[in-house]
Amino acid sequence: MSIFASYDQLLNAEAVRSQAARVTQRVRDGAGLFVLHDDAIDGCAQKVVDITLARYPDLDIPYHSRWRHFSTPAATALESRLFEVLGEQDPQDAARLGFDLVIPSVLLDAGAGPDWGFQAPDADSLIGRSEGLGLASLDMFLGGAFSTSGEARTDAAALSGLTDDDLRRGFQVDDQNPLVGLDGRLNLLRSLGATMIARPDLFPTGRPGDLVTRLTDAFGDEIPAREILGLVLEALSPIWPSGRSEDTDGVDLGDAWPYAPFGDGPDAIVPFHKLSQWLTYSLAETCEKGGLTVVGLDVLTGLPEYRNGGLLYETGVISLRDAVLAGSLHTPGSELIVEWRALTISILDEVADLVRAKLSRPEMLLAEILEGGTWAAGRSLAFDRTPDGSPPLHLDSDGTVF
C-alpha cells in the first residue's frame, strides 16, 4: 500500500521523520549499506551531554540557529553593527530585517571546505567554516550588497543581479583562499531573487522580510513552527537545482532524494529539507527577537549534515558494511549518503531522549540539544581525527546541501 499519495506530501517535517524511520528500520534489519550499533547510542549521548555542559554549564542554551554565527568572540564589530541597525526598527520591522539577513545567509552556508577563511574587520586571523560564512554574509548585508539601495536590507532585484565577482569579493575568495561550491551559492541567491519576483503574492515588496507579514496576517503573534517550515518550502523549494529526482509531477521537492531500495514513486523519495529546516530554526529565533511567539518547534527534525552524521560515525553508532566505501567520493543523491542522512535524522531523536534523561531536563527542545550539543560534538570529534576537521566520509558538495 502506498504511504504517500502525491509528491507534495513530502514537503513537511513529518515526512522527513517517517521516511528516515523506514530507512533506519531497513538498516536495523541488516539490509543497508550501514550497520547500526544500538549499544553505542548511550555513549554517543554521553558525549553530547559532556560537551553541552562544557559549553553551556547553566543549560541556558539558545537554538541551533544562524544567529550563533553572527556572534563570534574573535570578531564582534559586525555583530555590534547589526544590533545597532536592528535597534533602530520597531520589533516587527526588526523581524522583517532579520528575515532579509537570515534567509540569504543560510542559503550561503553549505560547507566551505578546509582552505577558506574570512578576515573580519576586527579579527586577528581568518575565520573559517560556518562562523566565517556567517560573518561574510553579514558583512555583505550590512554593506548593502543585497540591496539595490545600498542599505542593510535585501531585495529581489539586487539578488538577481549578483555576479560571480560580487560573491568572490564579499567572501574574499582568490586562488589562496578557495571556497567550495561558489557557483552553487551564487545560483541559489540569484534563484531566490527570481523566485521573489515570480511570487508577488508572497513577496509584495520584493523582500524576504515580506514573509513576516504573511505569517502574522495568518497566525497573529503566535506562529506554529510547522507553518514557518511550510512557508519556507512553498517559497523557496523552486530555488534548488533541478534533476534531484526523475519525475515528481511538477512538484519542487528541493532536498529530497530517491532511495533505490524503496522502488519508485513518492514512497521512494526520502526528504531531508536540511537547509529549509535550519532556516526555520533560524527564522523562529528571528521571530522571537521581534516579539513574536513560536510554538511547536519540536515538530522539526535534527539536521542531516556531516557534523551530526559524523557524530554517529565517529562514536561507533553506525559503521559501513563495506569499509572500502569510506575511500570513495559520494554525491548527495547516492544511496550511501541518503542512508547516512536518514540514519542521522532517526538516531538524533534517540540521542536527544537520552540527553534529556541524563540532564534531567525533559523539556529540552531538540533545537537546544543540537546547539548544545550534537553539532559541536560532531565537529570536535572530526578535529580530533584530522587537523582540518573534514567529514569522515568524502562528499562531492555543490554548495547547496551540506
Image: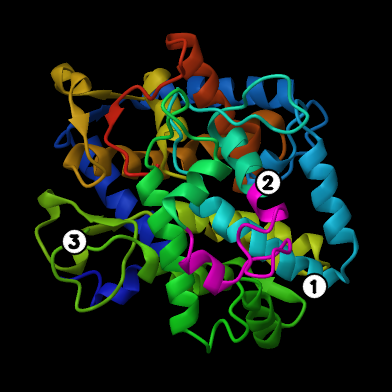
Q: Is residue 149 magenta?
A: yes
In space, the residues marked 1 and 2 are separated at their CA atoms by 20 Å
Compared with 234, 143 (above or below) is above
The residue sitting at 73% across, 43% down in the picture is: 62
User: Earlier along the polypeptide chain: callout 1 or callout 2?
Assistant: 1
Q: Nearer the viewer, mark 3 or mark 1?
A: 1
Residue 302 disc label = none
Which residue, given by chain and number where applicable, does mark 2 sit on? 139
The answer to which image quadrant residue 347 occupies is top left
Image quadrant for the N terminus?
bottom left
Q: Are marks 2 and 3 in contact (CB under 8 Å)?
A: no
Q: How is the image coloured?
A: rainbow
Left or right of 285 in this view: 179: left
Residue 245 disc label = 3
Q: Position of residue 367 (x, y in %)?
A: 62, 47
Magenta span: helix, strand or loop, mainly? loop
Q: Position of residue 235 (x, y in %)?
A: 47, 74
Three-letter code, disc 1: Asp
In space, the residues marked 2 and 3 are separated at their CA atoms by 36 Å
Q: What's drawn in magenta, residue-wise?
A: 139-162
Q: Position of residue 72 (x, y in %)?
A: 73, 32
In space, the residues marked 3 and 1 are separated at their CA atoms by 39 Å
Q: Are marks 1 and 2 in contact (CB under 8 Å)?
A: no
